[in-house]
Image (cartoon, helix red, strand yellow):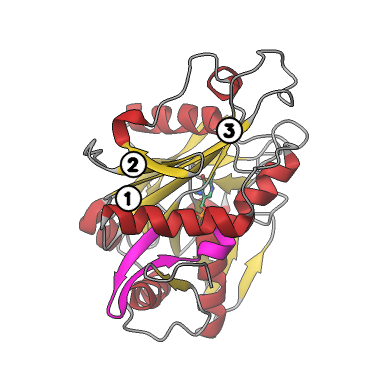
Amino acid sequence: MAFTGKDQVWMNGKLVAWKDATVHVATHALHYGTGIFEGIRAYETKHGSAVYRLPEHMRRLYDSCRVYRMDPPWPLEELSAAVLDTVRANGYASCYIRPLVWRGVESLGLDPRPCPVEASVIVWEWSAMFGAEGLEKGIDVGVSSWTRLAPNTLPAMAKASANYANSALIKMQASLDGYGEAIALDESGLVSEGSGQNLFLVRDKVIHTPAINSSILQGITRDSVITIARDLGYDVREAAIPREMLYLADEAFFCGTAVEVTPVRSIDKITVGNGARGPVTAAIQQHFFGIIKGDIPDTHRWLTPVASTVAR
Ligand code: PMP
């Protein structure tokens, strides 16, 4: 990813130059992780540029705020329009979009409620996270020694900045160990997810993914994958997955806004299946990329044209 420093940023209600989109060091979120964010992509489809699953991302943003008793001063529709405005203002046909809502400057007491709720949207150009090779050949991953957020600690369903301290530990360890990513387990030792992506396994043509009680973020791409897989006639099961299933799967893949649908070719140096992208992963990838390119009809209405002024 690359910041050009030339982009327009939507900040607290208006578009400002990149260099002017700054916060004070007394910002509550900077000290205590009291931010909520989203990661969204806009794609260049055959029918024009479109934001992928904008209403679902904005709903999750506001749901996450609700858990943390944050009331953004802009209604959901207004922040959704701000996303489209920011993409348009910067003229990207495809880009990554990062809305952020945070507790600003008032007090550094641990109760954030006296602090104002602020918001911004930045965008940048970002292609496939692991490159074309990652999408085709898959990545090597290890099981992390860091555990995902335990229930009643940090709520995993809320996409809070604070959660990403855990993700950073998982990701740093994976990189230092020579892996592209890691799979983290939940506090019971069951499979959870990656540092910033959900995991799917395939065995005997049945597709398995951890359920929402496995300390996962309920990914929007995960929902797309489940929907696509069922449309294609596959049996998809959301349930607790024991660690050893990782080593017995015929196929494994990660999914998320950043990684899209990326095959996993080895886990803890044990080859997944025969080490090549499997047929189920390939079918789901083909369908996913077909929709975002506009080659396959958007029957589920996942694309919001960037040219529209309000979210659909
Ligand atoms: N899990 C975590 C921890 C994440 O940060 C993300 C990325 N938002 C995901 C899963 C995938 O979610 P989505 O498909 O909505 O991007």
Quarter in which the C terminus is drawn:
bottom right
| Residue 264 quadrant | bottom left
Q: Which residue is mark 3?
A: 102
Q: Which residue is mark 2?
A: 180
At x 69%, y 50%, the residue is 63
Q: Which residue is mark 1?
A: 139
Q: Nearer the viewer, residue 128 or 281?
A: 128
CB atoms of marks 2 and 1 within 8 Å: yes
Specify whether residue 272 is in view.
Answer: no
- Mark 3 to mark 1: distance in Å? 34 Å
Q: Position of residue 152 (x, y in %)?
A: 78, 34
Q: Nearer the viewer, residue 2 or 281?
A: 2
- Mark 2 to mark 3: distance in Å? 30 Å
At x 73%, y 44%, the residue is 66
Q: Nearer the viewer, mark 3 or mark 1?
A: 3
Q: Secondary structure at mark 1?
A: strand
Q: Nearer the viewer, residue 268 or 288?
A: 288
Q: Please state if 259 lies on the left or on the right of 222 as rendered.
A: left
- Mark 2 to mark 1: distance in Å? 6 Å
